[in-house]
Image: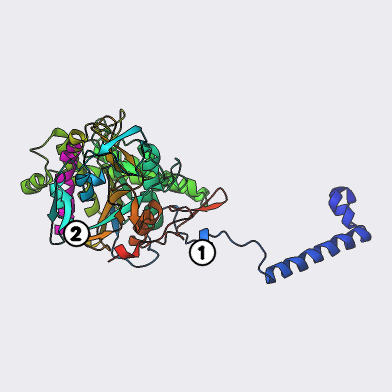
Amino acid sequence: MTNPEKITRQGRSLLDRRSFLGVAGLSTSGLALTSLLNQDGLLAKEPSAAGGVEPIRPEIDARNPYAARSAHFSVPAKQVLVIYCPGAVSHVDTFDYKPALKKLDGQKPPQLPAVTFEGPSGNIAKPFWDFQPKGETGKMVSDLLPALGNHVDDFCFFHSLSTETSAHPQGENFMNTGFTMEGFPSFGSWVTYALGTENQELPAFVAINDPRGLARSGKNNFGNGFLPAAFQGTDFTAANPPNNLNRHSRFSASEDKRTVDLLARLNAAHLEKYPDDANLAGRIASYELAGKMQTSVPDVMNLDGETESTLRAYGVEGGSELRGKYARNCLLARRLLEKGVRVVQLFNGSDPSGGNGITNWDSHANIAKTHAMQAEIMDVPTAALIADLKQRGMLDHTLVVWATEFGRMPFLQANGTGRDHNPGAFTCFLAGAGVKHGFSHGESDEFGFKAEVNKTSVYDFNATLLHLMGLDHRRLTFYHNGLERRLTNVHGHVIKEALA
């Protein structure tokens, strides 16, 4: 007989016939109850996203997290360019024409708030620039942005956007991550998590910061949040490449290559010991990509091959110094897309010292001067970038997004020279693959104060962007802290009217 001293106390209790039968009876009852609950559909199910839909998990090889993956459904868009303007561009001074403002210029706003985000409101102010009909569609566009105005027949405008916040950090977070709080994955991270990238020698997601620095929410605008670190944006500009890519002058190219080859063998041997360690595999893949970038990044950043006519069209010379730097960033964006980078996010505006119209579009005072400063930097290079993509046939497979975090008020602040934040209505536009051309969706009220016709939330906007990339916003999820998280939280509907 087995030595009873080597059996656990629970085991010894089962040697007693009465205890054994009692435990067996309870176990059998539990199995029967489980069977009955399963028949009635009352057992806990696998995690599901909001609405009960089944999540779609991208099949990610930990050894190659950047490999290209299939979309949920077939669409023309394979890449996306996001042109983001921090500070809140005034829709009523750019793309949302409101004749009522001219009629009531200088009058007290009827039934509009006496106090807004930064204090007392002043009188209604007509647009600071005249509007002209543009293109075959006759779209009314402000003289502030003449170059972009020449391409309105290629754009799909959203005029009834509204947001949940009137503060810049939260507004940037909401537009770029779907949440006002920090710590959530950005749109670009969701796309690269789902789709990977075609180019294995460059990052899947590149963020090109404004020449003046980071936007208010900094790297959160292109961060990975709780998604694997491989899917965060890599940020650099035409003037500032990623750090630590250059080979030290003490080492020759052959010595550097031998070192890289040795590291690759050592990493492979280490990974064989821990084949199921996804974090280890991801780190190795990240280091290997960094090694490839030593040659691929200098090549893509070298603008010497660009023609004189291209440089002139982008406005590299002939304008302000900042316009020239931003124009080079626009050229870098096109070159990255040409190389197959999945997501490029291009920033026009920063916030190193509070902004307020000097470093971004936040014009609480002297909007006529400050918006004009930003437009001089943004208009010509951005229009040239979109035109260049079209001329090269790249808009056939590239979605272009022009966005800002909210709008500005139709009336002035008490200082009489600036417009306050307006979360109730603002304008963004799309171009390229999968969207209607020369189309406007939704309307704000007669003053541009509130979204009125086909009111569109940021959730709806982001749901539409994901759909245009072939992704179901309800099913693209990541299980985190007991929840199936997604870009659109538990909200959002695709704006089908905007689809081509």
Q: Amino acid at mark 1?
A: Val
Q: Which mark is residue 53?
A: 1
Q: Which mark is residue 154?
A: 2
Q: Main secondary structure of the magenta part?
A: helix
Give the color scheme: rainbow, by chain, secondary structure or one colour: rainbow
Q: What residue range appears in magenta?
A: 372-395
Visible residue check, residue 68: no
| Rendered image quadrant of residue 324 | top left
Query: Which of pointers 1 and 2 lies earlier in the amino acid sequence?
Result: 1
Q: Is residue 121 left or right of residue 54?
A: left
Q: Foreground: 257 or 375?
A: 375
Q: How many marks?
A: 2
Q: Foreground: 249 or 278?
A: 278
| Camera-side mark, 1 or 2 | 2
**The stretch drawn in magenta includes residue 152:** no
Please state the horizontal and vertical placement of residue 403, each as a whole percent of the image: 29, 48
